[in-house]
């Protein structure tokens, strides 16, 4: 069997938040579903009933904490508590997979340890469901 096509290393991504590109400040951008499965086992040997719940999504980001103009940390602090639009495209270019969704902006970290890069790591709640598509 030949190797699968379409696999790639996560680099050269596009991460747009409120129409501003931030991929150059991030080292992680990941849309994660939490989708519970309920299982009921009955008294017969093959008696299993299962139901899959609707997913609840989060958007995990990590990267540089840039607190200046055009910095994601500054933008998140300004938008904290409001809904912001996100587009995640794991590989730049046309015809590539995309996810567009709304997140609730949270306050990012501020400061850090001496001698280290100022970084931030956040898990932002997604409002509703992402829309998956293809880049134009």
Image: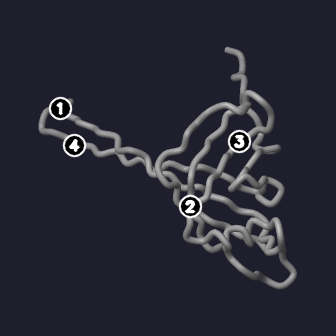
As rendered, which of 17 and 41 lies closer to the eye? 17
Q: Which residue is mark 2?
A: 83
Query: CB under 8 Å between callouts 2 and 1?
Result: no
Q: Earlier in the sequence, mark 2 or mark 4?
A: 4
Please name which of the two marks, 3 or 1, marks the residue nearer to the observer: 3
Nearest-to-viewer mark from 1 and 4: 4
Q: CA distance from mark 1 to mark 4?
A: 13 Å
Is label 2 or label 1 in front?
2
- Say what secondary structure mark 2 lies in: strand
* Residue occupying the point 83% across, 70% down: 69
Spatial separation of the CA atoms under disc 2 and disc 4? 37 Å
| N-terminal-most mark, 2 or 3 | 2
Residue 64 coordinates in the image, percent (x, y): 79, 67
Residue in the image at 50% along x and 48% along y:
33
The answer for how far apart the CA atoms under marks 3 and 1 are is: 46 Å
Give the alpha-carbon distance from disc 2 to disc 3, as whole Å: 20 Å
Q: Which residue is mark 1?
A: 45
Residue that numbered label 3 is attached to:
89
- Residue 40 is labelled as 4
Is 68 left or right of 39, judged from the image as shown? Answer: right
Q: Position of residue 91 (x, y in %)?
A: 76, 38
Q: Position of residue 62 (x, y in %)?
A: 70, 62
Question: What is the C-alpha distance between the residues marked 4 and 3?
Answer: 38 Å
Find the residue positioned furthest to the top: 1
């Amino acid at each position: 069997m030949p190797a699968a096509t379409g696999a790639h290393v996560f680099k050269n991504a596009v991460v747009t938040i409120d129409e501003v590109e931030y991929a150059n400040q991030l080292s992680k951008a990941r849309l994660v579903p939490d989708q519970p499965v309920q299982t009921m086992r009955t008294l017969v040997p093959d008696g299993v009933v299962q139901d899959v719940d609707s997913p609840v999504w989060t958007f995990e980001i990590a990267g540089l904490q840039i607190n200046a103009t055009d910095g994601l940390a500054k933008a998140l602090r300004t938008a904290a508590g409001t809904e912001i639009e996100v587009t995640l495209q794991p590989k730049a270019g046309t015809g590539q997979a995309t996810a567009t969704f709304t997140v609730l902006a949270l306050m990012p970290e501020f400061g850090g340890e001496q001698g280290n890069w100022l970084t931030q790591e956040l898990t932002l709640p997604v409002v509703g469901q992402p829309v998956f598509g293809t880049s134009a």
